[in-house]
């Protein structure tokens, strides 16, 4: 765990945030998009970006989809949220596994109880932010799944033919089930959905996965 209360620890955490956790890229482009209803999605924001969004949008809540982790970016994010009075929820979604039933329930409950405006982010703003954004549109805004799943798109940096394509497959399985027999999304998740069976059915394209895993170093 990084101690940012002392100058040397703070400097090491700063280096870690920018070099190891690729914050130097996000300082240039934060992959920020407005989802409507007071919710935004992005990549991991720096303290300066959090201050900027707080001034510009009046952020009251941040949902960190990376969970608590040991990169310097987490400690600086926690510090600036405390400073600005922003409530930070650190929960974990995964980019290469379909969401578990409990995770879908957790996100629905979060969307219902947090204060808006809010920001939801992962590391790169592509995969976990994508499924989080899609779930927000479905569970909170009441949008159709076919429309909401467009949050998983190449323009955000999401690759459908890599291992991360299992997230698209999750929604596609619901659409296939709904085409056979009309069923609501939450009802399907609660009664018919099996995340382990779905993952076993999914097959990714090896080249795309190489790019995502080894070149882009996605989590």
Image: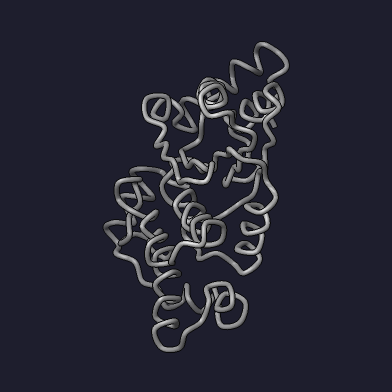
Question: Observer-nearest residue: 41 or 14?
Answer: 41
Left or right, 75 with respect to 125, comes to: right
Quadrant in the picture for residue 62 = top right
- Picture residue at 38% right of the left edge, 29% below the top: 25
Q: Is residue 84 above or below residue 173?
A: above
- Asked if 138 appears above or below 9 in the picture, the reply is below
Going 62% across and 52% down the picture, which residue do you hit?
Answer: 111
Q: Residue furthest left?
A: 207
Quarter of the picture holding the N terminus: top right
Query: Relative to 156, does residue 147 appear above or below in the rendering?
Result: below
Kindly give the residue lying farthest to the bottom in the view shown. Answer: 180
| Residue 190, image quadrant | bottom right
Toward the viewer: 122 or 54?
A: 54
Vertical order, 6 against 112 (above or below): above
Task: State the image coordinates of residue 99 (x, y, percent, origin top left).
Answer: 55, 64
Q: How is the image coloured?
A: one colour
Q: Residue at x 70, y 21 (%)?
A: 83
Q: Can you give x and y, in whole percent of width and height, for residue 104 in the image?
A: 60, 63
Q: Is residue 29 left or right of residue 103?
A: left
Q: Residue at x 46, y 39 (%)?
A: 42
Q: Is residue 55 left or right of residue 6?
A: left
Residue 71: image location, x then y, percent: 58, 33
């Amino acid at each position: 765990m990084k101690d940012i209360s002392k100058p040397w620890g703070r400097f090491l955490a700063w280096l870690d945030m920018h070099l190891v956790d690729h914050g130097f890229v996000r300082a240039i482009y934060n992959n920020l998009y407005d989802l409507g209803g007071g919710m935004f999605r992005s990549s991991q924001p720096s303290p300066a970006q959090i201050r900027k969004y707080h001034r510009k949008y009046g952020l009251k809540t941040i949902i960190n989809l990376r969970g608590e982790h040991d990169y310097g970016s987490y400690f600086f994010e926690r510090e600036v949220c405390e400073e600005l009075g922003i409530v930070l929820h650190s929960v974990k979604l995964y980019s290469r596994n379909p969401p578990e039933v409990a995770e879908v329930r957790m996100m629905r409950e979060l969307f219902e109880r947090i204060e808006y405006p809010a920001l939801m982010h992962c590391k790169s703003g592509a995969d976990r932010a994508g499924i989080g954004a899609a779930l927000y549109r479905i569970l909170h805004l009441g949008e159709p799944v076919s429309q909401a799943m467009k949050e998983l798109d190449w323009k955000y940096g999401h690759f459908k033919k890599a291992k991360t394509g299992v997230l698209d497959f999750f929604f596609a399985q619901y659409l296939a089930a709904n085409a056979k027999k009309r069923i609501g999304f939450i009802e399907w998740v609660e009664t018919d959905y099996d995340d382990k069976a779905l993952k076993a059915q999914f097959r990714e394209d090896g080249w795309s996965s190489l790019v995502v895993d080894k070149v882009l170093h996605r989590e």
